Amino acid sequence: MSATAASDAPCIAQAWYSPESWRQLEEAIAAAGMPKTMLCDSYAEFAARFDSMVREFERQGVRVEKVSIDVPHMVAWCRRWGLEINNAGRTRYGAMLALADGDREKLDARGFVDRTRAEH
């Protein structure tokens, strides 16, 4: 695929953890009393699954943009908005961070309304 074609391809954002942020995520999950089974067994497994997912999307003509996750910021953001740091909370954070072009200050300045929650 040419550079022009690649830039015109549909794109999705996907959370990316460095080895250090992965360790922080494991610690945050444990501190929240959540089971480690919410994550891959290891960073190597996470990276391999990520690479596999990227290749599958590329085969379908979709670009994947890595969104680097700052775990302490993510945990604070989730708490601020009453979200757990489970898959759903992390996904919401990643999506909002992508909408803020990866800029945490811009993300913090935005409001957040979760329309996926049932009204009570």
Image (cartoon, rainbow, N blue to C red):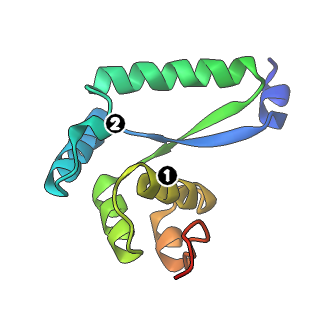
x and y percentages locating residue 102 in the rendered image: 53, 55
Among numbered discs 2 and 1, the one appearing first in the sequence: 2
What is the three-letter code of the residue carrying label 1? Thr
Check disc 1 and report its element: helix, strand or loop.
Answer: helix
Q: Which residue is mark 1?
A: 91
Rendering coords of residue 47 (x, y %): 40, 24
Would residue 25 appear left or right of 16 to someone viewing this image?
Answer: left
User: Depth check: 80 or 70 in front?
Assistant: 80
Residue at the spot 53% in from the left edge and 18% down from the top edge: 52
Give how far across and how far down residue 54 sits, in percent.
59, 24
Asked if residue 29 is positioned above or below residue 108 in the image, the reply reads above
Residue 34: mark: none
Task: Give left or right: position of 74 versus 111.
Answer: left
Q: Amino acid at mark 2?
A: Ser
Apparent side of residue 47 relative to residue 63 in the rendered image (left or right): left
Q: Residues within 10 Å of mark 2 (few under 14, many from 20)?
A: few
Q: Quadrant of the N terminus?
A: top right
Write down the residue under mark 2.
18
Contact (Cβ within 8 Å) of mark 2 with mark 1: no
Q: Is residue 117 above or below residue 19?
A: below
